[in-house]
Amino acid sequence: MGEANNPSVEEQLSEKVTRLSRLLQQELVIPISIFASPLSPAEALVKYLKEHKNLRLAEIARLLNRDQRGIWCTHKRAQTKMPAVLAITAASPTVHASVFCERKLSILEHVVHHLRSQNIAVKDIAQLINKHPSTIASVHHRVRRKLR
């Protein structure tokens, strides 16, 4: 009886290993346009990874170097605020998901830092992510202070 269960457990483990290696091999690219939604940057990111990339919450937590319970709460809050699917602009700049695992900066700080490092002007970043230019300028200032 115990032997009948072993193949299914091994198959499940194999599936998880395959899925995680696929995650690591493919560099997940996040379109910047998702951050223009009425959601917080964390909610938008988790919602995108869950709904568009079909990742499990545990995988999102590992990818973002966050606690799985926090990811669950963030996703739940995002679903409550915005049940509809996130709109993605085709010509939107992108950022690699791997940058968000560094916990020194917030998600919005990572986005602003990435876009400023590509010499995109503060006012253009503000338009891309639907924020006020002074917000982007203060976030950029905070990033520069943190990275000294």
Image (cartoon, rainbow, N blue to C red):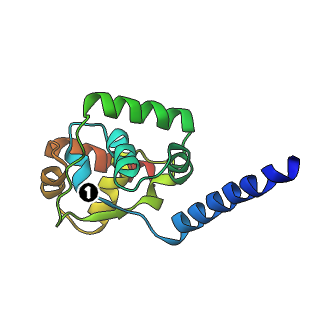
Q: Indicate left or right for 6 with 126 as reference.
A: right
Report which residue position mark 1 lands on. 32
Place of residue 15 in the rendered image (x, y in percent of width and height, measured from the top left): 62, 60
* Residue at 69 percent of width and 59 percent of height: 11
Quadrant of the image occupied by residue 76: top left
- Mark 1 neighbour density, 10 Å: few (under 14) some (14–19) many (20 or more): many
Residue occupying the far bottom of the picture: 25
Residue type (three-letter) at the residue carrying disc 1: Ile
Q: Which residue is drawn at 24% across and 47% down?
A: 86
- The residue lying at 86 percent from left, 53 percent from top is 3
Q: Which of 52 and 137 is in front in this view?
A: 52
Left or right of residue 71: residue 14: right
Q: Is 14 or 57 nearer to us in this picture?
A: 14
Please provide percent x and percent y for residue 116.
27, 61
User: Percent from the top left, x then y, of residue 34?
Assistant: 25, 50
**92 horizontally vs 103: left or right:** left
Residue at image coords 45%, 68%: 27
- For residue 119, what is the image quadrant? bottom left
Image-based side of 11 in relation to 136, left or right:
right
In the image shown, does 126 or 66 lie closer to the viewer? 66
Q: What element carries label 1?
A: helix
Q: In which quarter of the image is residue 89?
A: bottom left
Depicted 73 relative to depicted 94: above or below: above
The number of callouts visible is 1
- Vertical order, 118 against 136 (above or below): below
Rendered-image quadrant of the C terminus:
bottom left
